[in-house]
Amino acid sequence: MTIISKKHFSAILLTVGLTSAAACANNTSVNAPIAQANTIAQRLVSSTVAQKPSGQFGKPIDCTLGKDCFVLLYFDRDPSPAAVDFGCGRQTYDGHDGTDFAIPDAKAMAKGVPVIASAAGKVLRVRDGVVDRRLQNPTDKANVSGTECGNGIVIDHGAGWEAQYCHLRQNSVVVKPGMQVQKGTVLGMVGNSGMASFPHVHVTFRYQGKAVDPFVGADAKLGCNTARNPIWDKPIDYVSTGLIRAGFANKAPDDNAVWAGQFSETKLPINSPALIFWVQAYGVLKGDREQYKLFAPNGETIINDSKEIPAPSRTWLRYAGKKNSTNSPLIPGVWRAEYRLTRGDRVLTEVKREVELR
Ligand SMILES: [Zn+2]
């Protein structure tokens, strides 16, 4: 007997939402004089030259986008309670004032992915010591009140520019207030501290105190599809739909387990209660189609199922699989699975995976 079970976990993306630099600095007694001095200097600069250098900031994470990291959420460009990203997509939420560079799971986080300075500058404020704990529901949100940024760093990048880096891994921050950093200097490691429901670094750029969407620049009008003058030194593609991770499990996976890095095995015991092929994606839209296929070691097609996605979701976890039963046992050998996500004629994501049952 083949079972096809699918489940849609409405994603609780509570992510960051830190609006003020102060919320990222609980050690103000040490840092206040530095911050204050800078503010005065900043005012002088802004009142005289008001430079807006663009095209100078690097991405704040040392990884290859599309390979081992991805932008999961963008800046919210809609002033109303609705939310829209600069590409007119939904990969943001109301009031999100930065960009989330995410990594696949807590295993990658434990290995260590460096957060790096987007440009040269002076460290203004630092916080560390906040535990890495994935937010799962609104109650968790209250628990991180006052430390939404988690472990974070604020850097004065000069000429009126400032950047705040959030959610670093507990006890990974390696810079101190007053330190000069170069572009690319390691600040710490990507983590899951503060108000974050997945491992990532949130970066907020500010020009003269006002949050700037780095993909469109400081002068952009609100809303989407406006003129773009990105502040990035190299183009960063807008990828609003993609794969986070895929794999096999011997029981139904859930968001927590998947973000924790579970179910990445390439070998499973033959007496497993089930063989489940799962896929975690981001940025799916209503009307997208997904297809799951599962092939037994003898080549037999066990599952070939195609379904339309009923509602948009910023993150998406689904699966298909086969139970192990006396009547229809799992057979030993290499099982293959395929997944394809399409929008109209466009293939957005294709995945192939293998697992050995023995
Ligand atoms: Zn964020």
Image (cartoon, grey):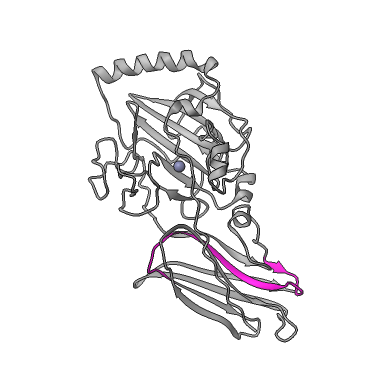
Percent of width and height locating residue 31? 51, 17
Please, is residue 79 above or below residue 253 in the view? above
Q: Is residue 68 left or right of residue 313?
A: right
Q: Residue visible at 53% across and 43% down?
A: 196
Q: Quadrant of the N terminus?
A: bottom right
Percent of width and height locating residue 213? 34, 40
**Front residue of this view, candidates 324 and 45:** 324
Please, is residue 312 above or below residue 340 in the view? above
Is residue 282 shown in magenta?
yes
Percent of width and height locating residue 257? 63, 56
Q: Is residue 56 left or right of residue 149?
A: left
Q: Residue visible at 45% across and 59% down?
A: 242
Ligand 1 location (quadrant): top left
Please, is residue 20 above or below residue 265 in the view? above
Q: Residue visible at 38% across and 41% down?
A: 95
The magenta span reads 266-289
Is residue 69 shown in magenta?
no
Q: Quadrant of residue 77?
A: top left
**Front residue of this view, candidates 337 and 233:** 337
**Front residue of this view, candidates 349 and 309:** 309
